[in-house]
Image (tube, rainbow, N blue to C red):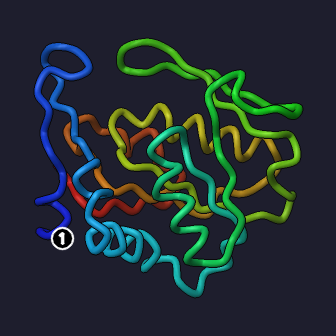
Amino acid sequence: MDRLRKKIRDIPDFPKPGIVFKDITPLVKDPAALRLAVHQLIHPFLGRDITAIAGMEARGFIFGSLVAWDLGLPFIPLRKPGKLPYDVQSVAYDLEYGSATLEAHIDAFDSNDRVLLIDDLLATGGTAKASCDLVEKLGAKVEAIAFVVELDFLEGREKLSNYEVHSLLHY
């Protein structure tokens, strides 16, 4: 994991003063590191009955689509409002510095789908919990949630106590 940790860049005071942003762009720029991250995200779930991968906008699309491709499973994007062209279901939620909404097509999941949610970072858990709520609102089951980075001090995992959570790097 040290190899991946070296590819995460700290950006102080972004998006506002006092926040240290964990920048994953050096990781996705390095094909070997990206491949390693994807394989490490998948590893705990090999052999499980996962039927779909969902990723949260926007960086969850990067890792989620690669995980889906690697596993040969469908990828479902969970998007910001107004980005999907078909009928949607939505979930509103609070962030550490505002509020947001996620949407997915109403036919994104089947009732027997077992979904692995993927995102780059777990902070306060708001986006991940809303993603779980959206998947379940659409009738599927959240099998687990996987992150590249988890900011342990923000205790986002507590909001996800009903779910299996896997994170590659902890800060």
Q: Assign a secondary structure to mark 1.
A: loop
Q: Nearer the viewer, residue 93 or 26?
A: 26
Q: Residue at x 68, y 78 (%)?
A: 49
Tag 1: amino acid = Met
Q: Residue at x 35, y 45 (%)?
A: 121
Q: Return the x and y of residue 108 as percentages of the image width and height.
A: 81, 49
Q: Horizontally, is 111 left or right of 76 in the view? A: right
Dividing the picture into quadrants, the one containing residue 78 is: top right
Write down the residue under mark 1. Answer: 1
Q: Horizontally, is 148 left or right of 83 in the view? A: left
- Examine the rendered structure and indicate whether residue 161 appears above or below residue 106: below
Furthest toward the bottom, the residue is 47
Label 1: few (<14), some (14–19) or many (≥20) C-alpha neighbours in 10 Å: few
Q: Return the x and y of residue 101 as percentages of the image width and height.
A: 61, 23
Q: Return the x and y of residue 91 as percentages of the image width and height.
A: 68, 27
Q: Nearer the viewer, residue 160 or 46?
A: 46
